[in-house]
Structure formats: C-alpha cells, structure tokens
C-alpha cells in the first residue's frame, strides 16, 4: 500500500525540527521559510499546527496551471516541471492551503514528499507528522483537514487561517 504524509496538530510541540529538516534537505540551509511544509505557531495561545501539502486527488494547483508545468507523477505526488513553468503564480493562488510558494525568480516550489522518504516526518519526534500507509483514524483526520480550505490571501495568510480552524475543530 502507498504511504502518505499525515499531520496531527494535537501532537505538535512547535519545535520546528520538521521545517529545519525540510529546508536543509531541499535548499541546504536551516531556514523554515524555505521549507515545503510549515508550522504555524500561536505562542501566546499555546498551540502549533503543521501545515502540509495533501497531494490532493483533485489538485487545484495542477488544474489551473496553463502550461502543464504542474503534473502528477506515477506515485501520485504533484510535482513541478521547472522547464515548462512561466512563473505566472496561478498555482500559488489556487492552493487553498497555502502550500505553494514562489522563489525569488518566481518559480514555484512545493512538497514532493522527498521522493518517498519525507525528511520532516523522520525528524518529528512527537509523531505529529507521520509517513505511513495510515489507518482509519488518520484518514479521517486527513479528510477533515482537507475540508478546511481558504481561497483568498497570501500562502502565509491561508496557512494561518487553516491552522486556526484546525485547532478550533480539534479535540486538543
Ligand atoms: S499544493 Fe495545495 S492544491 Fe496542490 S496538491 Fe498540495 S495541497 Fe493540494
Ligand atoms: S517536528 Fe513534529 S512536533 Fe516539531 S514542529 Fe514539526 S510537526 Fe511539530
């Protein structure tokens, strides 16, 4: 069975090991702002929420791409072909979870699950991020998270709104 990435906000401590691991793996720097997944911290309210790409079965980022630069690989992961990308940013606007960003040259970047072995999940000691075939509870959690969508604002604003709503709806 195919493994997927799952996030459980109730287990997240906000340590940011995941974003450090991701940015190191993808960009060679410890810089959470360059990570393909993020953690939204609400320090004054005492909670943190990992934001992940869901590799959506019906992926808005892919559907709006006018040049087919965004595509789905045989493994189900949504990826970018940089050679086809015009830098229009439609995918950034389209992702309702704020999980596509553009680099300084306007080229988008997003999670590609580290080609099947995501660095973030390996570094999460709290099991707030797990890469597994999943069970009913995890799939239920993921489905509930995917219903929390925000179509306006910057990726940062969308992630913030998603994180707030997820925490409000969680049992934690
Ligand atoms: S970037 Fe956004 S729309 Fe695209 S697959 Fe990931 S979560 Fe879905
Ligand atoms: S490594 Fe795990 S516990 Fe730490 S911030 Fe990331 S998701 Fe949360």
Image (tube, helix red, strand yellow):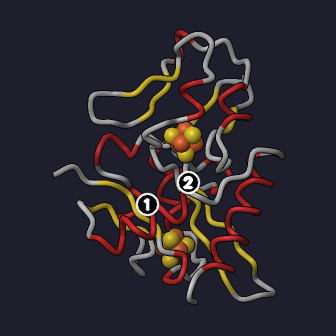
> Disc 2, disc 1: CB below 8 Å?
yes
Query: What percent of the width, then of the height, locates residue 106?
Result: 72, 24
Indicate the position of residue 84 as horizontal and vertical percent values.
Answer: 54, 10
* Quadrant housing the C terminus: bottom right
Q: How packed is label 2: few (under 14 Cα within 10 Å), some, or many (20 or more)?
A: many
Vertical order, 33 against 105 (above or below): below
Is ligand 2 within 8 Å of the beta carbon of the residue shown at mark 1? yes
Q: Residue at x 46, y 61 (%)?
A: 143
Residue 142's quadrant in the figure? bottom left
> Badge 1: how crowded within 10 Å, few (<14), some, or many (20+)?
many
* Element under disc 1: helix
x, y percent for residue 65: 61, 19
Q: Name the residue carrying label 1.
A: 120
Ligand 1 in which quarter: top right
Residue at image location 57% in from the left, 70% down from the top: 16
- Which mark is on residue 37? 2
Residue 101 found in image quarter: top right
Residue at 45 percent across and 43 percent down: it is: 55
User: CA separation, marks 2 and 1?
Assistant: 8 Å
User: Is 96 located above or below residue 6 in the figure?
Assistant: above
Circle 2: element type: loop
Does 96 sit above or below residue 13?
A: above
Residue closer to the observer: 142 or 47:
142
In primary-sequence order, the first of circles 2 and 1 is 2
Residue 27 visible, this orientation: no
């Amino acid at each position: 069975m195919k493994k997927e990435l799952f996030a459980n906000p109730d287990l997240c401590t906000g340590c940011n090991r995941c974003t450090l691991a991701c940015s190191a793996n993808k960009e060679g720097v410890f810089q959470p702002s360059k990570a393909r997944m993020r953690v939204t911290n609400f320090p004054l309210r005492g909670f943190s929420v990992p934001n992940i790409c869901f590799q959506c079965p019906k992926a808005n980022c892919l559907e709006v791409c006018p040049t087919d630069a965004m595509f789905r690989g045989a493994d189900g992961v949504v990826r970018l072909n940089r050679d086809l990308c015009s830098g229009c940013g439609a995918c950034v606007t389209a992702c309702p979870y704020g999980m596509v960003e553009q680099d300084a040259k306007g080229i988008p970047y997003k999670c590609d699950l580290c080609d099947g072995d995501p660095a973030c999940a390996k570094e999460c000691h709290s099991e707030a991020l797990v890469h597994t075939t999943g069970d009913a509870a995890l799939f239920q959690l993921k489905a509930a998270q995917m219903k929390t969508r925000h179509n306006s604002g910057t990726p940062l604003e969308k992630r913030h709104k998603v994180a707030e709503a997820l925490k409000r709806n969680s049992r934690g």
